[in-house]
Image (cartoon, rainbow, N blue to C red):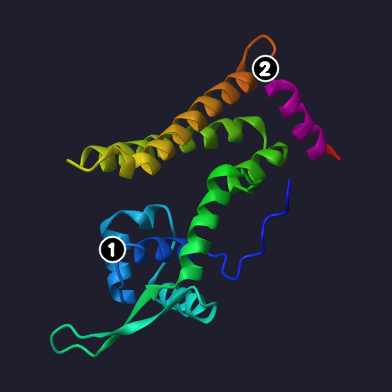
């Protein structure tokens, strides 16, 4: 497999900016409003400062360019940006890489699972119960986002459906994990607890 190309800008917010500029030239304030109005803030982390920083990086890399200025009422003029040909190519290639090539990621929960033996089993079971309650709240939030979308084409809700599928999978994993800890016949709890008791004695 050929190595992935090194990108001039790697922040996923940059990918979102490029994708919105496919539609039409915009200034950063319009980009921010479009990202929030379309719910992209649930998928791409950003704020006012980071958006302007990314716009500057994209312009420096030659992926977007100034297309003029616009004025809204008495507000100061705002610089409007548009995609360059290089930006359009970068957007498509970046999307192809993200969709076609899974990457090893480092989720915080996976890190916690790899080190979970440092806590006693009773506490772990309690914490996992708390996590499931919070997962249920996140699932309700995702379902509400889908249901409130109205006549939006399902294509534009696919990220919420994926998020919901991941939350469902994590809930099922936690349920099975807790069962393996507390099973009265061959659960891991007694040996795990004994390890912590022994460690306290030494």
The structure residue drawn at horizontal position 63% and vertical position 41%, both measured from the top left corner, is 110
Q: Is residue 142 left or right of residue 122?
A: left
Q: Which residues are magenta?
A: 187-200
Residue 12 seen by the camera = no
Question: How far across and how far down the image is residue 44, in percent?
Answer: 43, 58
SS at mark 2 in the image: loop
Question: How far across and how far down the image is residue 106, in percent?
Answer: 64, 49
Question: How far across and how far down the image is residue 137, in percent?
Answer: 35, 39
Query: Foreground residue, 197 or 14?
Result: 14
Query: Foreground residue, 7 or 92?
Result: 92
Write down the quadrant of residue 67 in the picture. bottom left
Q: Residue furthest top?
A: 185
Quadrant (top left, top right, bottom left, bottom right) of the N terminus:
top right
Write down the quadrant of residue 100 in the picture. top right
Query: Is residue 25 found inside the magenta-colored segment of the image?
Result: no
Query: Foreground residue, 147 or 16?
Result: 16
Q: Which mark is residue 88?
A: none
Q: Which residue is mark 1?
A: 34
Above or below, 191 relative to 49: above
Q: Is residue 151 left or right of residue 89?
A: left
The structure residue drawn at horizontal position 53% and vertical position 34%, both measured from the top left corner, is 128
The structure residue drawn at horizontal position 73% and vertical position 28%, both measured from the top left corner, is 192
Q: Residue furthest front?
A: 85
Query: Is residue 199 found inside the magenta-colored segment of the image?
Result: yes
Magenta stretch, main secondary structure, is helix
The structure residue drawn at horizontal position 72% and vertical position 28%, both measured from the top left corner, is 193
SS at mark 1 in the image: helix
Q: Which residue is mark 2?
A: 187
Residue 186 seen by the camera = yes
Using a 10 Å C-alpha cutoff, classify the residue at mark 1 as few (fewer than 14 neighbours), some (14 to 19) or many (20 or more).
some
Q: CA distance from mark 2 to mark 1?
A: 51 Å
């Amino acid at each position: 497999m050929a190595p992935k190309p090194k990108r001039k800008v790697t922040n996923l917010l940059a990918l979102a900016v490029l994708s919105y500029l496919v539609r039409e030239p915009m200034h950063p304030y319009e980009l921010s409003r479009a990202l929030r109005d379309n719910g992209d803030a649930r998928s791409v982390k950003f704020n006012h400062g980071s958006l302007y920083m990314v716009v500057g990086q994209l312009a420096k890399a030659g992926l977007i360019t100034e297309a003029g200025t616009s004025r809204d009422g008495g507000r100061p003029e705002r610089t409007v940006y548009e995609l360059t040909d290089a930006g359009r190519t970068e957007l498509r290639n970046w999307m192809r890489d993200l969709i076609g090539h899974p990457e090893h990621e480092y989720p915080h929960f996976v890190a916690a699972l790899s080190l979970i033996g440092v806590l006693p089993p009773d506490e772990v079971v309690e914490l996992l119960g708390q996590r499931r309650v919070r997962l249920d709240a996140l699932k309700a939030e995702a379902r509400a986002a889908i249901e409130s979308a109205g006549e939006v084409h399902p294509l534009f809700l696919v990220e919420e459906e994926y998020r919901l599928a991941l939350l469902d999978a994590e809930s099922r994993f936690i349920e099975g994990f807790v069962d393996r800890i507390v099973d009265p016949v061959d659960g891991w709890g007694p040996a795990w607890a004994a390890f912590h008791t022994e460690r306290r004695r030494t």
